């Protein structure tokens, strides 16, 4: 399971967390591994299951 960085940024912007969104945009890869970044996602109060990319066929 991967998460598009844009989805994380959009979720943060919706909450008005613009500085965090800008940081994520600068620091994270385009495709985020939730296992590798689980601590960051928890700190940002984001549920990886809500943000995961749809499986590609």
Image (tube, helix red, strand yellow):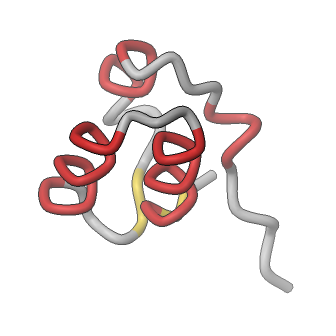
In this rendering, position of residue 8 left or right of residue 21: right
- The correct choice, above or below, for 57 with respect to 26 in the image is below
**In the rendering, at what x and y percent does residue 30 appear?**
35, 71
In this rendering, position of residue 45 left or right of residue 21: right
**In the rendering, at what x and y percent does residue 56 appear?**
78, 80
- The residue lying at 17 percent from left, 48 percent from top is 23
- The answer to which quarter of the image holds residue 42 is top left
- The correct choice, above or below, for 2 with respect to 6 in the image is above
- The residue lying at 38 percent from left, 34 percent from top is 17
In the picture as drawn, the residue positioned furthest to the right comes out as 57
In this rendering, position of residue 26 left or right of residue 24: left
- The correct choice, above or below, for 34 with respect to 38 in the image is below
- The correct choice, above or below, for 25 with respect to 18 in the image is below
Q: Nearer the viewer, residue 4 or 6?
A: 6
**In the rendering, at what x and y percent does residue 49 appear?**
73, 35
- The residue lying at 56 percent from left, 26 percent from top is 46
- The answer to which quarter of the image holds residue 57 is bottom right
- The residue lying at 57 percent from left, 58 percent from top is 7
In the picture as drawn, the residue positioned furthest to the bottom comes out as 57
């Amino acid at each position: 399971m991967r998460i598009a960085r844009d989805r994380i940024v959009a979720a943060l912007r919706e909450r008005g967390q613009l500085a965090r969104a800008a940081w994520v945009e600068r620091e994270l890869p385009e495709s985020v591994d939730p296992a590798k970044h689980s601590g960051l996602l928890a700190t940002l109060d984001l549920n990886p299951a809500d943000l995961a990319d749809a499986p590609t066929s």
